[in-house]
């Protein structure tokens, strides 16, 4: 009876140090989602870089503490960044519930997936509602695409209309640039949040219909979760650029 001799090299290959799962062994849909998110990140980066270039090219700029100091429907003045802080908290918490939904999917816990997806959808809708309220409030103040509170005014009336929003010198051009870029960039982000809410609703319906139970995997929840986390991460940068810097 012959015996097979195992070399030391073969022992190393078969041992605990032979390596784990290949980092390239990823599902096609997940790879495509990452490609999309990277390309979308370039778009948001271009928007924010342009905003930063415009802001620092101007001798003066609108003070965020002055323009965002109200809580619509509660307080008109004296609460700087409180409302947008609430919006940010809601969106971050929706990211937490999405993590819990993905984790429940990994454990094939359908009821938990449904529960956490519902909370995620609710968080997204609340954020969009808050953004709509903020937009409406700013519109009533005179800010909109191609317009600011001094549009149509002349002489000293321009400075009087814009004075509440500037700390240093007043600039009609800076106010107009701020208005255009604020509604464009936050609107673009809001569009992404809306798409994310729609995708989450579709995934919730598929979960309720036992689609993933039949497939034996909740991988689709993880893919949509990647998109949702991206939307939350982008908001952190939008929040920093418009409200903090």
Image (cartoon, rainbow, N blue to C red):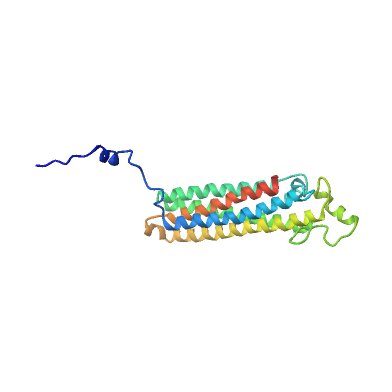
Q: Where does the image place residue 103, in percent across and percent down from the top left?
A: 45, 48
Vertical order, 206 against 107 (above or below): below
> Which is nearer the eye, 163 or 61?
61
Relative placement, left or right, of 125 versus 134 is: left
Relative placement, left or right, of 94 versus 138 is: left
Res 74 seen here: no
The mark tally for this picture is: 0
Residue 175 in which image quadrant: bottom right
Residue visible at 45% across and 61% down in the picture: 206
* Image quadrant in which the N terminus is located: top left
Residue 212 in which image quadrant: bottom left
Query: Which residue, as the protein is rendered here, is positioned at the far right?
Result: 156
Relative placement, left or right, of 13 versus 161 is: left
Q: Where does the image place residue 91, in percent across and percent down from the top left?
A: 59, 50
Query: Which residue, as the protein is rendered here, is positioned at the far left?
Result: 1
Q: Where does the image place residue 98, in percent across and percent down from the top left?
A: 51, 50
> Which is nearer the eye, 236 or 21?
21
Residue visible at 52% across and 60% down in the picture: 199
> Which is nearer the eye, 83 or 21?
21
Q: Where does the image place residue 53, in percent across and percent down from the top left?
A: 71, 51
* Image quadrant in which the C terminus is located: top right
Res 140 seen here: yes
């Amino acid at each position: 009876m012959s015996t097979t001799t195992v070399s030391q090299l073969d022992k190393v290959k078969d041992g605990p140090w032979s390596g784990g799962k290949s980092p390239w062994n990823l599902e096609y849909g997940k790879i495509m989602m990452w490609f999309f998110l990277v390309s979308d990140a370039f778009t948001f980066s271009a928007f924010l870089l342009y905003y930063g270039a415009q802001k620092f090219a101007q001798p003066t700029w609108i003070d965020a503490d002055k323009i965002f100091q109200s809580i619509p429907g509660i307080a008109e003045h004296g609460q700087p960044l409180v409302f947008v802080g609430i919006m940010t908290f809601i969106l971050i918490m929706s990211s937490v519930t999405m993590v819990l939904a993905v984790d429940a999917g990994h454990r094939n816990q359908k009821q938990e997936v449904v529960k956490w997806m519902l909370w995620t959808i609710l968080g997204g809708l609340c954020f969009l509602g808050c953004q709509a309220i903020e937009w409406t409030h700013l519109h009533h103040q005179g800010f909109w695409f191609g317009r600011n509170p001094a549009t149509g005014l002349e002489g000293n009336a321009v400075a009087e209309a814009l004075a509440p929003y500037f700390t240093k010198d007043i600039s009609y051009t800076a106010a107009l640039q701020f208005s255009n870029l604020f509604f464009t960039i936050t609107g673009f982000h809001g569009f992404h949040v809306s798409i994310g809410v729609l995708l989450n609703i579709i995934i919730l319906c598929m979960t309720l219909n036992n689609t993933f139970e039949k497939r034996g995997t909740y991988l689709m929840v993880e893919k949509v979760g990647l998109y949702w986390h991206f939307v939350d991460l982008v908001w952190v940068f939008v929040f920093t650029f418009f409200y903090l810097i």
